[in-house]
Image (tube, grey):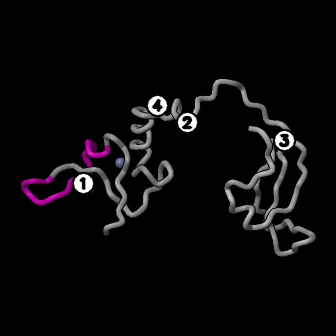
Amino acid sequence: MSDLKFCQGPECHTYHTKDRLKGTKPNKTYQTRRRSSMYYGGGNFCDMRCQNDWFQKFGDRAINYFGRTTEVKHLTEDNAWLKDYDYNWRDDNNPKSNYRFVNSITKEQRPLTEAQYNDSNYTLNTGE
Ligand SMILES: [Zn+2]
């Protein structure tokens, strides 16, 4: 019970649904949803409406804070490596591994270990 997360939607408490109405009579109020897990916005929002409300209110500021795209980006051989899991693919040197890099431009494939696959910082891409 103590591990419930609060929906981050700024308007969540304003929506009239039965599950938001909490408390004891006569002091019931519509309240921000709390759940052990949520499926929207990286686990931060109870539904798509709350996720959209957040973006409507804070999205511009968040984009400016983290860096607004102001130039065209180009997909090239150097940044086209994608991690992939394919049950039918085998690394000849490591026959139990089904993990690989695939270059979406050249179609070249290179073996990848499971640890590298799960490491979000590990990449063959250079540049953006
Ligand atoms: Zn919500």
43 sits left or right of 33 in the view: right
Q: Which residue is mark 1?
A: 18
118 sits left or right of 53 in the view: right
- Which residue shows up at 81% across the image and 62% down it? 112
Question: What is the quadrant of the C terminus in the image?
Answer: top right
Q: Counting other residues with Cα less than 10 Å from the Cα at mark 2, is it few (<14), some (14-19), or many (20 or more)?
A: few
Position of residue 108 measured from the top left corner of the image (x, y, whole percent): 90, 51
Kindly check if marks 2 and 3 are in contact, taking CB atoms under 8 A apart as contact: no
Q: Which residue is mark 4?
A: 61
- Which residue shows up at 10% across the image and 53% down it? 27
Q: Nearer the viewer, residue 59 or 119?
A: 119
The magenta segment is 12-28
Q: Which residue is mark 3?
A: 78
Mark before the other along the chain sequence, 2 or 1: 1
* The quarter of the displayed image where residue 72 is located: top right
Residue 84, compared with residue 59, is above or below; it is below
- Which residue shows up at 49% across the image and 35% down it? 62
Residue type marked 1: Lys
Mark before the other along the chain sequence, 4 or 3: 4
Q: Nearer the viewer, residue 14 or 81?
A: 81
